[in-house]
Image: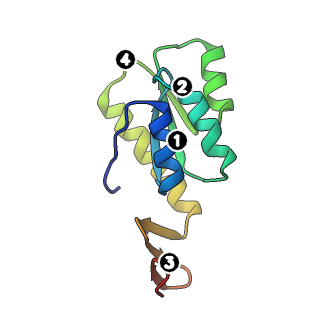
Amino acid sequence: MGFARVVHDGASACQRLAESEYDIVVLDVMIPRRNGLDVCRQLRLSRKETLVLMLTACDGADARIDGLDSGADDYMTKPFALAELTARLRALWRRGAARENVLRLGDLHVDTIKRSVRRGAKT
């Protein structure tokens, strides 16, 4: 896993997700200026396959269903153990790596099947 970016509200999250590619996003349901469910739905409408781990203090079945139906790949309730969070992120990473043959870091793209590298428009 690479570097992390932190934003503190849903509007900023939507902007960042539109501007850049991310492998995994950890979203809190109760963030201001657009909740995590809305951010996740917007991400899925954009057809990006970014993996999403949803965090929330709501632990009822309806809340979990809402999170997963919004497009989240996994769902954790607070409070949680940091070790469990990192284990779930590793599991999501494995699932994502199995379906992804192009590795991305900013404008650098490495296609592991075609054995090609592209930075921006240069191949």
User: Which comes sooner in the sequence, label 2 or label 1?
Assistant: 1
**Classed neighbour count for the residue bearing mark 3: other residues with Cα under 10 Å, few (<14), some (14–19), many (≥20):** few
Q: CA distance from mark 2 to mark 1?
A: 10 Å
Left or right of residue 100, residue 93 in this image: left
Q: Earlier in the sequence, mark 4 or mark 3?
A: 4
Q: CA distance from mark 1 to mark 4?
A: 25 Å
Q: Earlier in the sequence, mark 1 or mark 3?
A: 1
Badge 2: residue crowd in 10 Å (few <14, some 14–19, many ≥20): some
**Image vertical order of residue 63 relative to residue 42, above or below:** above
Which structural element holds mark 4? loop
Amino acid beneath label 1? Cys
| Residue at 32%, 25% in the rendered image | 81
Residues at marks 2 and 3, CA–CA distance in whole angstroms = 36 Å
What is the x, y in percent for residue 10?
Answer: 49, 32
The x and y percentages for residue 85 are 38, 34
> In the image, which disc is placed on residue 14?
1
Q: Secondary structure at mark 2?
A: loop
Q: Residue at x 66, y 32 (%)?
A: 70
| Disc 2 target residue | 35
* Circle 3 residue: 112
Query: In which quadrant will I find the N terminus?
Result: bottom left
Relative height, residue 28 to residue 19 (above, below): above
Amino acid marked by disc 3: Thr
Is disc 4 in contact with disc 3, using a CB cutoff of under 8 Å?
Answer: no
Amino acid of disc 2: Asn
Q: Are marks 2 and 1 in contact (CB under 8 Å)?
A: no
Q: CA distance from mark 4 to mark 2?
A: 19 Å
Q: Please name whichever residue, 43 or 116, is drawn nearer the observer in this view of the structure.
A: 43
Q: What residue is pinned by disc 4?
A: 79
Residue 76 image position (x, y, % from top left): 48, 26
